[in-house]
Image: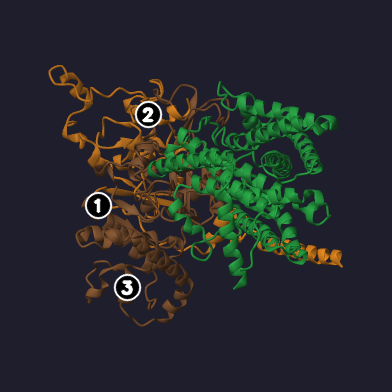
Chain colours: A brown, B green, C orange
Amino acid sequence: MSNNTKKWFSLNLNRTKKSEACGCGNNASSCEEKTPKDGYNQVMDVSMSRRSAFKKLTAGLLIGAGAVSTSCSVISGDESKEKSAIEWDEYFKGNYKLMTDKEKNETVNRLVRSYELRTGKKINLSSKDAEEDVLFGYAFNISKCQGYMDCVNACIEENNQDRASQMQYIRIHEMEDGKGFNFEESDDNYYHEVPAEGHFYMGTQCFHCDNPPCVEVCPVQATWKEKDGIVVIDYDWCVGCRYCMAACPYDGRRFNWKTPEVPEEEVNKNQHYLGNRLRKKGVMEKCTFCIQRSRKGQNPACVEACPTGARTFGNLLDPDSTIRWVLENKKVFRLKEDLGTEPKFWYYMD
Amino acid sequence: MKSLKVVGSLIKDSLAEITHGSRAYHIWMAILTFVMLFGMYNYGIQLEQGLSATGMTDRVSWGLYISNFTFLVGVAAAAVMLVLPAYVLKNIDFKQAVLIGEGLAVAALLMCLAFVVADMGGPARLWHMIPVIGVFNFPNSMLTWDVLVLNGYLFINITVPLYILIMRYQGKTPNPKIYIPGVFISVFWAVAIHMITAFLYQGLQARPFWNNALLGPRFLASAFAAGPALIILVLAVIRKFTEFKVPDNTIKKISLIVTVAAQINLIMLISELFKEFYAPTHHSISAVYLFFGIEGKVALLPWIWTSITMNVIATTVLTFHKLRSNFKILYVACGMLFVAIWIEKGFGLIVPGFIPGPWGKIAEYTPTFVEISVTIGIWAMGAFIFTILAKTGIAIELGKIVYKKK
Amino acid sequence: MKYLKIAIIKKVMLGTLICLFVISCKHTEEKYHNVMEKIEGESVKYKAPSVSSPMINAEIKTVLVEEGETAFLIPERKSQISSYNCVECHTEPLSVLMQKQVDKKAAHWDIKLNHANSEIMNCATCHTSNDMGNLHSLTSTTIDFNYSHKLCSQCHQKEFKDWKGGAHGKQLGGWSPPRLSNTCVNCHNPHAPQFEKRWPVRFNTEKVKERQ
């Protein structure tokens, strides 16, 4: 019945195929084009066939329940058919971490197309991998931060964060001089002229730990550390158990308690699969060092927005990078170092 | 073929059994059904709106659902610990209790799973967790361990009693060689589900309130108090409403288990309190919040003090042999103990773990109506399942339904 | 007989437990103990990655700073100064211009010097009436406006050192080479180098609600 050339089962609802018989879900799998298997596919098929079997089983159940009827109905337009075909494929795709380049491309194309179908606008969705010889690190100059919060705004705009719940990845803590780093007594939601007399400012966000506890606890490996040190989340794989949130000692993670709202005209169309693409309800998200920017050689939005130069970002492996100079020449420290999480986010003072 | 026939007949007979009963039974089941439906309706709202329909926030990201889950794991584990003396030590007294206990374990486990599913942000994507089809982060994530042990435990607890009941149903004696290994495994497994659920919290260096070596043992102690306490109450009800004979001695023996566990639990509580308040550190703030409140934020105060008062009173009452032997007092004490531990090991454990947040911010948690309704609905579901299981089980044990060879 | 079986069961259980513990050792492929070790170890065989700073384009004119071992780009300054070139107005000596000021609109009226105190600094600390188109150092060496950091570094040695290294001053462009950093006057007004007080650009009302 099936020739297993495709790793993801697809219904082929209306993608103009040769025969008329391919119209509906029941015999869809027999309609797939026959292409000879190469060695690579043969190997991959073994591990993936189980999921496609599961998919087919579910397809069968759904057809039985009549749930696919809408996508098969004659009256619904081509676009809605395509939409449901995309949704179908998206629901059954695998974990991004384990996808081949081809699969990554396919899902990226689907997501771009899906956005186009919904809004009529094109997005630029990247799936760029980590570069060799890159390990990202971040340094924050406590003496320089003035507490303007320009970084917070830039981050929200860049990363398409939910406007309704005012989600923000970055927190700026206003601390009193002479009390040390007393987070309990600090205020991260001040509203008065800054810098306030006798206070200093300290920003926190996801620290992209080298030994991240959040990655360890995720039951489905929906979050992991990329080769360049960025801790990312596959928003489509996350099941929303929030165990990672409980495991993070730095309050780096955010949860979409409801469907995030970003006005269409404010959507940043320059996106990365693991970065700022639009999220859905019930999944985790967090700072990704603006992966859509940093993988292209740019600085994260917070670094670019900071008017005081308190934020330094760079490649830890490059001996000539500024971040390395900071680590080697300033008295740097990290927060909660005793937990052994090895954050790649250092603080220093002038 | 024959065994299939037996099972088919058993299902038919038990269906007949559970649909017939006294007026009180019907009213009870009707109420449960209504509450379940109401819970499901509210769960529908939650699915529609997302978890924002609950009181959870980024600050307190686990609430009532996970609290109940944690508590029920204990109930499930404790129920089966009664199996050991019954089957191995030839202590006949326990046998009736064991059947009830295993039924309770099954009901509690199903409730656990329901609570976990209710807590998920994307329940539709839960297939990602199925090994082989999805990605199972084993052995790194304690949650995957928990999934394994809970489902394994559920499997054991369904198969063992099912085997025994089917044999009884046919009028045969169950073969100990077949079920004793299962019983043994389930006893070890009961400890495992408990410890692993404790490890789930204990393994988080981010939350000092949980990151505490006493958590696992305390889970066990409190479970062995709360679980058997519930069994005593259930046995009391069964004694009253059915012809099932539960000898006084059984209840007395179980109450002894409850007493010892409650005492150990209290000692551990004192040890924890001593550590947090004699030498308070930065990490004691959660405990301060729990027991005294911080900056006027006192949501948990009435609960935890009620819990501690009830716990102390119940344990004291149970400790005196004379008081414990009076069944009326015993039932009240067991009820108090059960509620006390539900509070203490439920949201008394989960919520303060998140308060203060990693940066010292205090945001309180109040469950919403939707959340409470779903919770009550799941409890009703547990009671419903247990009632069905117990009714069938009792009927078989009493020989009311017997396999008729045609 | 029965106890023997129990013993066997116990052994099997123990075996499974041991197996579980063995496989449950955390699976980490990392060979370094901490991130500093990792940085050291991995950067030994460092080869510059292929990405390069995308912001270095025609929009920002740059000049190269070479200080000892470090070399990096800073934005070109002269084209950014609105009244440059100075000699367009400063055709006569300053004293002559000052006398004419009675009937002409005052130039540089908006400049209030708020940089150190007047005993230490005045206009002539950096500018000279002899050569308006350039800055001059304490020792009267000519300094090009594009390289004003040389002037600042006379006093602000510590900041200068940090700036060269990258701990002070904002990076333009991206993290990847070539490096492009703001120079002193891109962030600090040389006549009033302190940052101004202002209101934060954000106030989170949801957070307030959450913490009630």
Secondary-structure class at tag 2: loop
- x and y percentages locating residue A242 in the rendered image: 51, 46
Q: Residue at x 37, y 28 (%)?
A: C200
Residue in front for this viewpoint, A257 or A25: A25
Q: Position of residue C164 (x, y in %)?
A: 44, 45
Disc 1 designates what residue? A118
The residue where tag 3 is placed is A27
Q: Is residue C82 visible?
A: yes
Q: Position of residue C179 (x, y in %)?
A: 38, 51
- Amino acid identity at mark 1: Arg
Q: Quadrant of residue B188?
A: bottom right
Q: Dot 2 surroundings within 10 Å: few (below 14), some, or many (20 or more)?
A: some
Query: What chain does mark 3 sit on?
Result: A
User: Residue B158: which numbered mark, if any?
Assistant: none
Disc number placed over residue C200 in the picture, else none: 2
Q: Image height check: is B147 above or below B176?
A: above
Distance from label 3 to label 1 (Cα)? 29 Å
Q: Is residue A213 left or right of residue C67?
A: right
Q: Chain of mark 2?
A: C
The chain that hosts pointer 1 is A
